[in-house]
């Protein structure tokens, strides 16, 4: 009975409002310092006072964002295509599986664990990381390694400042993003093929580039589960899988972390995975892409170096052999 | 079972027309979906990526029909249902038809008739090479599928030529397996079915060799 009650979403919502996370953490620290660690665990769930501003916006709920100068002139993919044509292998291998299955994943009151080489480890509420009143909309090209692309109006905040807030230590070189692992809702885990939880990572210099984005919405609404609700990375100059969906953990590391596709098949999927028309996937050319979601016959388009963002990110890879380090 | 005379003639008359309808059905279905998109009745009849959909639909249909062709002999030998052999050639021909459409869809919708890209694909991509090889091997079989050709070649030569279906089926299924990012679902199922069908032949061949030895 008791357990059932705790799992009820209404109770969860109430509970989150009762105890702002920062206070909860701080109180635990204080009590722990005083040698009351055991007591703290019990008191932790008790109601507190203050309310935090700008609560997490639910999946599919309206979201306001100021337009950003980052935009492309090409027609945007239809919202329906964005929501019904997804790669999220945890929810199935077919493109329409995530839309069917991902709704079962509870993304309310999301927490992100921050760990590794950081001076601010801990568990954070989304509203600790994202100011939902300061969102911006960026229209980016999204290029999948499978040779299709969509133009998507993402909503979110730049990644760099959020990572800075999480105080990576001076020795930290990479940020690793782990996708939430929900063994009950994620019906695709059974297929195997990748190591779970899904892992992606960026060098901190890449993550600090202004294009690197933390998306919480798209098309004027909170992200839906199939697209990585409630928070995901969007790295428009890299192939789509470099964006980690439904991020549960951010880990700062000194060494290059293992990343899902790179571990599964390093010859085909490199760590950098920059969009590169000159570096063919061993099984198909990357020189072209099918533009999806614009109606008609999926027009073909020539793929651009760094997905058209060379001016913004080219400096990061100046001295790197991008064929070898693909 | 094999001695059942009713089974030996069952379906002798309606088998051929019925098979024809069944073999044309996937094409009719795809044509209907394209009609819906082209006329705007339902622009989403094939989902978001209609190029990939069309391409995969034709490829999967070709492979499945090819596997059905390979299942004819085992079914006949196990059940004694002889008339089923009457439809074997048209099933095989349908497999070629869908494989050729699959190739045309690839060249047209995906590569935009760019032969440079095609050449690059053929040289660099193992799975494309395997698929092409399978299709090329199907051509002589399709061409010689008429009664006249059987007569002209003689049954023995014809049988020897049509033995090519085994290597080409392996090529086609390998092509299917190599193109996916993770081996699962349909390609895996095709591989398992092919293994069973070929395994059955190997086992029968092995038994055939054992039996005379046992007598001696």
Image (spheres, coloured by chain):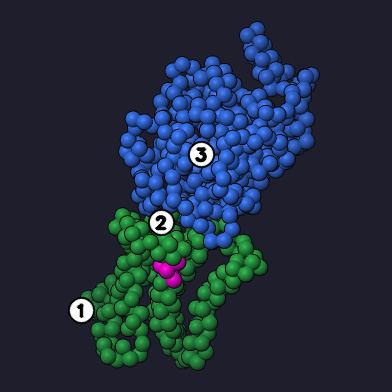
| Chain blue in the figure, letter | A
**Chain assignment, label 2:** B
**Same chain, marks 3 and 1?**
no
Give coordinates of residue A263: x percent, y percent.
41, 39
Looking at the figure, which quarter contains the N terminus of chain A? top right
Chain identifier of the green chain: B
Q: Which chain does the numbered disc 3 sit on?
A: A
Q: Distance between the residues labelled 3 and 1?
A: 74 Å
Left or right: A285 as drawn, with respect to A189: left
- Eye-nearest disc, 3 or 1: 3
Q: Identify the mark nearer the N-term, 2 or 1.
A: 2
Considering only vertical position in the picture, is A170 above or below A11?
Answer: above
Q: Mark 1 points at which residue?
A: B216
Kindly tell me whether residue B145 is visible in this rendering: yes
Between disc 2 and disc 3, the foreground one is 3
The correct choice, above or below, for B83 with respect to A84 in the image is below
* Residue corresponding to mark 3: A236
Inspect this view and state whether residue A4 appears.
Answer: no
**Tag on residue B179?**
2
Q: Which of A9 and A96 is in front in this view?
A: A96
Q: Mark 1 lies on which chain?
A: B
Q: Farthest residue toward the top?
A: A34
- Left or right of A206? Residue B120 is left
Are labels 2 and 3 assigned to the same chain? no
Magenta-drawn segment: B101-105
User: Which residue: 24% across, 78% down?
Assistant: B212
Q: Magenta stretch mostly in which secondary structure?
A: helix
Kindly identify the residue that appears in the image at 43 percent across and 62 percent down: B112
- Asked whether the residues under the numbered discs 3 and 1 touch, taking CB atoms below 8 Å apart as contact, a structural biologist would say no
Q: In the rendering, at what x and y percent does residue B37 appear?
A: 60, 66
Residue at (37%, 39%) from the top-left corner?
A326
User: Do callouts 2 and 1 mark residues in contact (Cβ within 8 Å)?
Assistant: no
């Amino acid at each position: 009975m008791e357990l059932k009650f705790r799992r009820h979403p209404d109770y969860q919502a109430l509970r989150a409002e009762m105890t702002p996370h920062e206070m909860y953490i701080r109180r635990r620290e204080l009590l722990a310092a005083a040698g009351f660690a055991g007591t703290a665990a019990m008191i932790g769930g008790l109601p507190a006072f203050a309310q935090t501003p700008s609560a997490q916006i639910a999946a599919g709920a309206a979201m306001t964002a100021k337009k950003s100068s980052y935009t492309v002139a090409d027609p945007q993919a239809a919202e329906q295509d964005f929501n019904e044509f997804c790669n999220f292998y945890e929810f199935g291998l077919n493109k329409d599986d995530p839309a069917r299955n991902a709704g079962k994943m509870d993304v309310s009151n999301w927490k992100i664990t921050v760990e590794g080489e950081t001076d601010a480890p801990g568990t954070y509420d989304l509203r600790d990381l994202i100011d939902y009143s300061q969102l911006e909309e960026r229209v980016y090209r999204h290029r999948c390694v499978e040779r299709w692309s969509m133009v998507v109006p993402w909503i979110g905040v730049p990644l760099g400042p959020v990572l800075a807030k999480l105080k990576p230590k001076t020795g930290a070189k990479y940020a690793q993003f782990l996708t939430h692992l929900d063994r009950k809702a994620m019906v695709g885990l059974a297929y195997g093929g990748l190591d779970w939880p899904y892992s992606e990572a960026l060098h901190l210099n890449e993550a600090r580039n202004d294009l690197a984005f933390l998306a919480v919405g798209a098309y004027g609404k909170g992200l839906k589960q199939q697209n990585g609700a409630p928070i995901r990375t969007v790295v428009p100059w890299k192939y789509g899988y470099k964006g980690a969906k439904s991020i549960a953990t951010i880990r700062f590391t000194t060494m290059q972390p293992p990343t899902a596709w790179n571990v599964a098949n390093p010859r085909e999927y490199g760590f950098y995975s920059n969009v590169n028309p000159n570096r063919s996937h061993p099984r198909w050319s990357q020189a072209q892409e099918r533009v999806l979601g614009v109606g008609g016959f999926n027009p073909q388009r020539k793929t651009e170096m760094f997905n058209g963002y060379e001016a913004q990110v080219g400096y990061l890879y100046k001295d790197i052999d991008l064929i070898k380090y693909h | 079972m094999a001695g059942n005379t009713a089974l030996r003639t069952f379906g002798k008359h309606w088998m051929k027309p019925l098979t024809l309808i069944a073999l044309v059905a996937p094409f009719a279905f795809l044509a209907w979906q394209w009609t819906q998109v082209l006329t705007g009745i339902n622009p989403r009849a094939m989902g978001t990526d209609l190029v990939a959909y069309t391409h995969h639909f034709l490829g999967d249909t070709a492979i499945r029909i090819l596997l059905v062709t390979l299942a004819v002999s085992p079914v006949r030998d196990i059940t004694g249902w002889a008339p089923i052999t009457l439809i074997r050639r048209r099933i095989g021909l349908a497999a070629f038809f869908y494989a050729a459409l699959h190739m045309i869809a690839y060249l047209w919708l995906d590569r935009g008739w760019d032969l440079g890209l095609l050449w690059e694909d053929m040289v660099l991509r193992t799975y494309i090479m395997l698929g092409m090889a399978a299709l090329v091997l199907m051509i002589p079989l399709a061409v010689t599928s008429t009664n006249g050709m059987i007569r002209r070649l003689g049954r023995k030569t014809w049988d020897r030529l049509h033995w090519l279906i085994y290597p080409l089926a392996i090529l086609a299924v390998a092509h299917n397996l190599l193109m996916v990012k993770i081996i699962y679902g349909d390609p895996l199922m095709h591989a398992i079915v092919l293994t069973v069908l070929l395994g059955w032949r190997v086992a029968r061949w092995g038994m055939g060799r054992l039996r005379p030895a046992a007598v001696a």
